[in-house]
Image: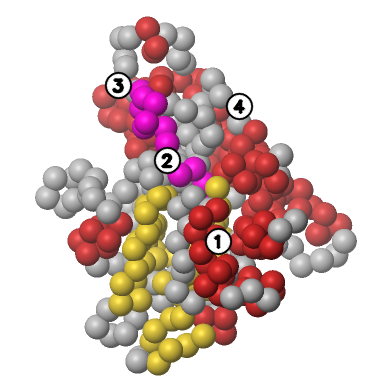
């Protein structure tokens, strides 16, 4: 194994580029350049936190680890093995907080995009609900198995904080109930068994603040109700608070200092499913697929690491 391959392996294990350079006895600039070339969407994180005019080494600044999943889009027509791989990755890395920022249930039977077309034939709401439920079961299965093993061995049981923020695809179910009120109490996001899998569930478009970072499916323009467009930096300027969103099928990150000496971060991490979507066309399916891991999260800032779904599926198949 070459040193570059080893550097990539250590990167996926959660090491910073500075730690990797020290571990491999290589110049930091060489490690950073190598990772930038090998990892699609790699962003060299700042390894310092600026506070009160002082430079504090991030390795000793404390904070929690957040693992963020967006847009898994489970559907009955696709294999859900990637959800099990994600679950194995979580059980292995054991982050403090697991946050799913929506669109686990695809609900293609409620889509208005191609309703009435040949591609729509055969879709059923019952199958959509079952697919989303199965995705959550597979995602949390390795965690439950790990907890059972730890209990049996008398070890401290890993119990992460788990957050689920509904996305626009889950909201399709609530829109159905609004259009057909006779279904109220039978269908709706509040009727989905998400909490049974350990998640605390929050409504569509309601930001949830965890360690100073706001998690929501997308940021809505208060004047139009539509998603903010543009880059992560543009959205960070608009809202003025640290955030992580999904929805937009891309990977983008922005950081900026504030007048009080603290740091803010904005991340768009828009997908974590392996299959292609026909409606996007050939070029539209070329986008980042994976998870975001924020290390040392406190006071609205954390150091980002991006892990591709391809790597997770290869390693935890």
Q: Which residues are magenta?
A: 279-292
Estimate the x, y position of residue 150 in percent, counting from the top left: 81, 59
What's the residue at 85%, 65% (across, down)?
154
The circle drawn on residue 112 is 3
Residue of label 4: 79
Q: Residue at x 71, y 44 (%)?
A: 316
Characterize the local packing of mark 4: few (<14), some (14-19) or many (20 or more) Cα atoms within 10 angstroms. few
Residue at 33% over, 9% down: 117
Quadrant of the image containing the C terminus? top right
Measured in 3D between alpha carbons, the distance from the residue under mark 4 to the one under mark 2, in whole angstroms, is 20 Å
Task: Compare marks 4 and 2 and give the one earlier in the sequence.
Answer: 4
Tell me the residue that label 2 is attached to: 287
Q: Mark 2 or mark 1, which has the lower sequence index?
A: 1
Number of numbered markers: 4
Q: In the rendered structure, which disc, 4 or 1, sits on the residue that comes first in sequence?
A: 1
Q: For residue 34, which numbered disc appears in the image?
A: 1
Q: CA distance from mark 3 to mark 4?
A: 23 Å
Give yes or no for residue 31 being in the magenta stretch: no
List x then y, in percent, for residue 196: 59, 43
Q: Label 4 to label 1, Cα distance in Å? A: 34 Å
Of badges 3 and 4, the one in the foreground is 4
Tell which circle, 2 or 3, labels the residue nearer the N-terminal end.
3
Disc 2 to disc 3, C-alpha distance: 23 Å
């Amino acid at each position: 194994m070459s040193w570059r391959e080893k550097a990539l392996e250590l990167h996926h294990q959660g090491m910073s580029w500075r730690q990797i350079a020290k571990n491999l006895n290589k110049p930091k600039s060489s490690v950073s350049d190598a990772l930038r070339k090998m990892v699609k969407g790699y962003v060299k994180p700042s390894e310092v936190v600026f506070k009160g005019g002082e430079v504090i080494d991030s390795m000793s600044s404390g904070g929690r680890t957040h693992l963020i999943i967006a847009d898994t889009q489970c559907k009955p027509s696709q294999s859900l093995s990637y959800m099990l791989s994600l679950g194995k990755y979580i059980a292995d890395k054991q982050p403090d907080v697991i946050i799913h920022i929506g669109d686990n249930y695809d609900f293609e039977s409620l889509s208005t995009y191609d309703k009435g077309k040949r591609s729509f034939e055969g879709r059923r709401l019952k199958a959509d609900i079952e697919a989303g439920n199965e995705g959550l079961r597979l995602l949390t299965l390795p965690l439950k198995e790990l907890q059972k093993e730890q209990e049996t061995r008398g070890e401290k049981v890993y119990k992460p904080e788990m957050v689920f923020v509904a996305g626009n695809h889950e909201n399709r179910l609530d829109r159905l109930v609004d259009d057909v009120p006779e279904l109220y109490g039978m269908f709706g996001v509040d009727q989905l068994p998400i909490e049974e899998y350990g998640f605390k569930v929050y409504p569509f478009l309601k930001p949830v603040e965890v360690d100073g970072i706001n998690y929501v499916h997308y940021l809505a323009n208060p004047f139009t109700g539509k998603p903010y467009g543009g880059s992560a930096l543009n959205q960070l300027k608009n809202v003025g608070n640290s955030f992580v969103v999904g929805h937009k099928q891309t990977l983008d990150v922005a950081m900026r200092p504030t007048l009080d000496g603290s740091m803010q971060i904005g991340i768009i991490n828009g997908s974590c499913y392996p299959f292609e979507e026909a409606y996007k066309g050939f070029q539209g399916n070329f986008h980042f697929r994976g998870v975001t891991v924020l290390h040392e999260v406190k006071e609205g800032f954390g150091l980002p690491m991006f892990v591709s779904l391809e790597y997770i599926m290869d390693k935890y198949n």
